[in-house]
Amino acid sequence: MGVYIKIVYYSTMSEAKRKCRQYNTNYLMYGFISSPSNAQLPMCLLCNRVLSNEAMKPSRLQEHLQKIHPDKQNKNLLFFTNIRDKFLKGPSVSGLLTTSSTQCDDGLIASYNISKLIAKSGKVHTIGEQLILPAIKEVLETVLHHSASYNVIKKVPLSNDTVRRRIDEIAEDVEVSLCELSVSNKFSLQVDESTLPGNEALLLAYVRLFKEGKIIQEMLFARTLIADTKGESIFNTVKDYFKEKNIPLVNIMSVATDGAPTMVGRHRGFIAFLKKEVPGILAVHCVIHPQHLVAKNLSDRLHQSLRYVISAVNKIRSNSLNDRLFAQLCKDNDEEFNRLILHTEVRWLSKGACLNRFWNIFESILEFLEEKDVDLRSKSLQFKTDIAYMTDLFAKFNDINLQFQGDELNFITTKSIISAFQKKLTLWKHNFGRNEYSQFPILCGLSYKNY
């Protein structure tokens, strides 16, 4: 009997705790009315957020107003009454639900678009929450003078995991679309093998095909080469991917590679294995690679001058103390730059950028080397004319290299660029024979000074 009374007592207490609170008209002073969809739930007039029934008490409603809408906490009852009247004269409940659903969809679309921008920029995924959302809030409040409510920010999820998931979904969708097009259409393939800083071998494959009357170019896949990077291993990786995605190898019309033996080897190269599967395929050498190789073929004198430049750069940049002292010297000399750029062979624009920076602060370099390395200073001064010439020359190489970048390039465009550059070389050679250096501004200025 005692147990039964205790059960009934606890049951009565539980029912009392679950007792629903009723809306009070005094709650309007905190900016709340009863929800149109459920009269037992409070809804904020400022952000249209619906709270639980347990929150329907003055302390909880006031807390929401102070934390979420601090700029409205001192508003009087008339202010909220006007907002309520406008709200009640607005669209119906079904319209509100439709609007809310549309806003959620817009927030989802914005989340995907921002995630795509993060992926393109190569930034860490946490930048969404740490920078982008606070920046959006700042713009809303400072520029547009709108309250960046919690509800608005919440509709654009940009957490680390969310951004990663969005990027994966976008990449998967692009891959599926490309594979569907590749199954039913002919296309061109470009394959390139590279090595990452951790010595991992990575194989990149790009496709170019027609879609709705336009030529599109996208990266098809990036696969790690487990063991070696021989032509057979590269071919097997490509073949396994095509088999996995049900893409016929015979759909490949042409393939572009660099000139490495693993790619173009007659017997064991990637193209040799591919031609066994697709005999009529057209194999081409990427036009940028031979141009880059030709640009590296300098005369002995220019090559020696370039070595002195690299030695001077390494002399300063390889030593932390020298780098700091040189930066201070550049500041004292009121130079535009206070640091040299290192040269690396794998970056095509690196040589031109290194020479251009070297020439811009050439006098400060000579002044610094006067105390650190007198012999290197004298060599740099001796080949000053050659350095000026190479600075102009590699600036022109960089210009032509930049013209080779882009998605809509083809052999006709690249051939016209190279042909135009060859004609310019002929003109420059003719002008050099007449001691005219107007096409080389740095060398021309140096010649006028010497004159």
Image (cartoon, rainbow, N blue to C red):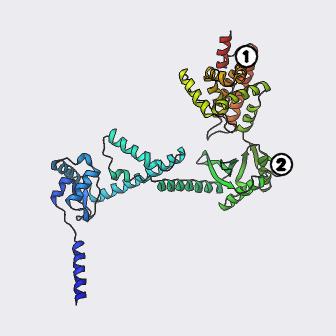
Nearer to the camera, 226 or 87: 226
- Which residue does the image show at 72% across and 29% down from the upper left? 419
- Which residue does the image show at 65% across and 19% down from the upper left? 442
- Farthest top residue in view: 451
104 lies left or right of 272: left
Dot label at residue 24: none
Nearer to the camera, 250 or 189: 189
Instruction: Measuring from the top left, give residue 114's x and y in whole percent.
Output: 47, 48
Element at badge 1? helix
Instruction: Measuring from the top left, give residue 200's x and y in whole percent.
Output: 68, 52
**Above or below: residue 142 compared with residue 184:** above
- What residue does disc 1 label? 431
State the separation of the CA atoms marked 2 and 1.
43 Å
- Farthest bottom residue in view: 1
Visible residue check, residue 287: no
**Above or below: residue 255 compared with residue 8:** above
Element at badge 2? loop
- What residue does disc 2 label? 266
Specify the amino acid type for callout 2: Arg
Q: Quadrant of the N terminus?
A: bottom left
Specify the amino acid type for callout 1: Asn
- Which residue does the image show at 61% across and 21% down from the upper left? 364
360 lies left or right of 37: right
- Farthest right residue in view: 267
